[in-house]
Image (cartoon, grey):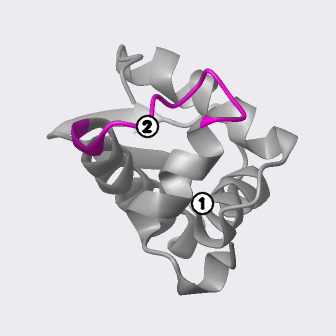
Amino acid sequence: MKLENTSDFERYVVLSNYTNVISGSYPNFVRLKELMSSLNQMVTKNNNTYTYYGELYVSSLTNPEISKIQSCLDLGVYNSSLEKLKHIFVDIGRRDF
C-alpha cells in the first residue's frame, strides 16, 4: 500500500498499529489533529508555549522534536519520535488520542 495515496486518517490508523500512544479511532484522530495544529503554531513562532482548548501550556518538547512527530504523522511512517507525544499528553492531562 502506497502511503502517499492515503488520507491523513488512514496514515494515523497505520501508525496506531505500531504504538500504544495513539488508538486509531476517528474522534481521537480529530483531537490529535487539533493538538498538532497548536503545536505546529508553536514551532512556527519559535516559542515553547501552546494553547489547547483555551489553556496555555509550556511544551516539554523542543521544536525539532515536534517537527519530527509531525513528519511521522504526515508520512505515515513510524519512528520513535511518535512516542514523545506521551509527554504532551501528560502536560494536557489527556491520554485518549
Q: Position of residue 64 (x, y in %)?
A: 77, 60
Quadrant the N terminus occupies: bottom right
Q: Using the rendered view, name the quadrant where residue 70 is placed.
A: bottom right
Please state if 89 lies on the left or on the right of 62 as rendered: left
Q: Is residue 83 magenta?
A: no
Say whether disc 2 or disc 1 marks the residue closer to the N-terminus. 2
Q: What amino acid is labelled 1 in the image?
A: Leu
Q: Which residue is mark 2?
A: 24
Q: Residue at x 62, y 21 (%)?
A: 20
Secondary structure mostly seen in the magenta stretch = loop
- Viewer-side label of 2, 1: 2
Nearer-the-camera pick, 42 or 34? 34
- Residue sitting at the far bottom: 5
Quadrant the C terminus occupies: top left
Residue interval drawn in magenta: 17-27
- Residue sitting at the far right: 80
- Residue sitting at the far front: 1
Q: Residue at x 61, y 23 (%)?
A: 87
Please state if 8 lies on the left or on the right of 63 as rendered: left
Nearer-the-camera pick, 67 or 9? 9
Q: Using the rendered view, name the quadrant where residue 66 is placed.
A: bottom right
Under tag 1, what secondary structure? helix
* Numbered label attached to residue 42: none
Q: Is residue 26 magenta?
A: yes
Please state if 60 lies on the left or on the right of 56 as rendered: right
Q: Which residue is mark 1?
A: 73
Q: Position of residue 89 (x, y in %)?
A: 47, 24
Nearer-the-camera pick, 52 or 14? 14
Compared to residue 55, the image places residue 42 above or below, namely below
Under tag 2, what secondary structure? loop
Compared to residue 10, the image places residue 18 above or below, namely above
User: How many other residues sit within 10 Å of disc 1, few (<14), some (14-19) or many (≥20)?
Assistant: many
